[in-house]
Amino acid sequence: MFVAIIICLLLFSPAIVDTNAKTITVGEAGEYRSIQQGIDRAGDGDTVLVGSGTYHENLNVNKQLIIKGIDDGNGYPIVCGNGPGCTIGIRSGGTRIEGLRVTGTDSKGTGIGVYSDGNTILGCVVSGNRLGIQVSDSRLNTITSNDLSDNYIGIDLNRSDNNMIADNVVNSNSFHGLKLYASAGNSILDNVACYNSDDAISLEQASDNNLISGNNVSFNALSSIEFENKNAISIYLSDGNVVSNNLLKLNGGTVARDGGAHIYRLGDGVQLKNTRDCVVKDNVMIDDHYAVWIDDSENATVTGNTASGEYYNIIVENSRDCLVADNVLSNGGRNLRLLNAHHCTLRNNTMSGGMYDITLTDSWYNTIENCTWGDSAPGYQSLWLSNSSYNTLTRNTAHDNGRGIWLESSANNRLYLNDFLDGIYSASQNNFWSTPGPETYQYNGRTYTGYLGNRYGDYGGHDVNGDGLGEIPYTQNGVADQYPLTGAVTDFLIPPPVPEPSPTSLSTPGPVVTPEPASPDLWQWLGMQLKTWLQYLHF
């Protein structure tokens, strides 16, 4: 498919088909002194070469052209717009702008405006505008290797889909570095977006299915005013976006909390608000406020990230059906927190050095499995459930923590096959401390069947018959485990259930047609059955 696309491009590219394309020169030694004059004299497929100098004009590109700045001894050409309009407006598709320095005389203007499809902007420096590059109602454009600094917004996509934004430097803009509004299917790859005053990359209002990958998004939103909600990457009311393999570091100004005992950043790494089906994976996040904040969202996936030094490393708030898996989290105020979050899964996460490693507040029907946490701060609970019920915790390991595990106003949780080595306290009596039913398991090479509880660091009982279970219950601090483990959880192997064989048939069955309930309109029902059979027979 890719080869076919390339062949089509080669066959139908105007630069190849049009053998009469010519080159027009602009500059002191060129055919024209004005770039617009060169554009007006050119035809589709022509190249306009712009020599060194400063050109005070606003350009209207209404033909398919290559406009290329060249350094003929006095630097690359500067195009300086007049007034609040657009310095370079591209209104014909397939145009290429390369090697220009574009600046506005009015901070309300746009440097380069793209209002057509399939254009390329390459190697330009755009500064001093309200919008450095604006792409509006356009698609399939490529913006690459440009420098967009000291604008209000570096790159602005408005209702524009399937564009490529790659290898640009988008620094020191007074609002956003890159902003997408109602723009879908775009790729934002390998850019540097630093020292912008607000969100470095902002997706708003139905900016769906975009890929943000390989970017360095650091040192943004360096304000020390609380609650301004400025972030490295912000995604709002937009679904299906993927944020992967980015570096997010030291975003937000600093503020002292806890009586001055701790200094925290105020800017978040990735914020998902009112989103569905977004993915945050394989990023490195260092010393932001929250590494990942998921708020009022559904079906978010946060996996494979490394986060350290945040106030919260990952927080899931007012959300449901989220997966947080395979992350490495360290040195956070709270490494992982669920707040009013339901039906979420926390799996295979490794946490260390937090004040609290995992906290659940007002969070129900969640699963915490195969997680490891240790080295939490003295005086803080490593795992804390508050008003959180009907959760399942299994195959987790807690070790070398401050105050161990604490369940407060939390009932009907099920905890089994965990290594709780630091102590546990349950202020609620109605929790369950073993598997829901008997399990067939292997221990030390032998097979047993029975209920399985948890291992406790302070359990004093013994395993007499070698089945891995203590002979006396563990009953301390509100815990009533009738089946405490004497060996490490990893020593208990539960084979997966054997799937039942599916029925076989000598012939391929036809479609299963289930009659609709009796209806007054028999002809309508017969028509529906006929349509089903025709689809099966590929009519």
Image (tube, grey):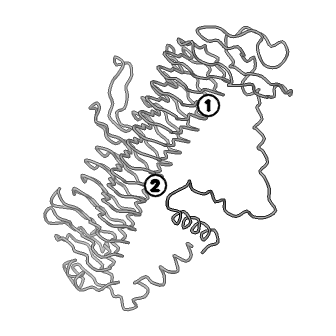
**195 lies left or right of 298:** left
Q: Distance between the residues labelled 2 and 1?
A: 29 Å
Residue 81 percent location from the top left of the image: 18, 66
- For marks 2 and 1, the one nearer the N-term is 2
**Which of the 4 image quadrants contains residue 447?**
top right
Which mark, residue 355?
A: none
Please name the amino acid that badge 1 sits on. Answer: Glu
Which residue is drawn at the image coordinates 33% and 50% (left, top)? 204
What residue sits right under mark 1 in the picture? 369
Return the residue found at the far front: 520
Instruction: Give coordinates of residue 190: x percent, y percent.
Output: 45, 55
SS state under label 1: strand
Mark 2, Cα crowd under 10 Å, few <14 / some 14-19 / many 20+, is some
Most foreground residue, 369 or 217? 369
The amino acid type found where label 2 is placed reads Leu
- Locate residue 492 relative to residue 242 in the image: left or right: right
SS state under label 2: strand
Question: What residue is drawn where x is 37% and y is 64%?
Answer: 143
Q: Position of residue 95 (x, y in %)?
A: 34, 75
- Viewer-side residue, 71 vs 441: 441
Q: Residues within 10 Å of mark 1 (few under 14, many from 20)?
A: many
Q: Which residue in the protein does label 2 denote?
A: 211
Query: How many callouts does the rendering have?
Result: 2
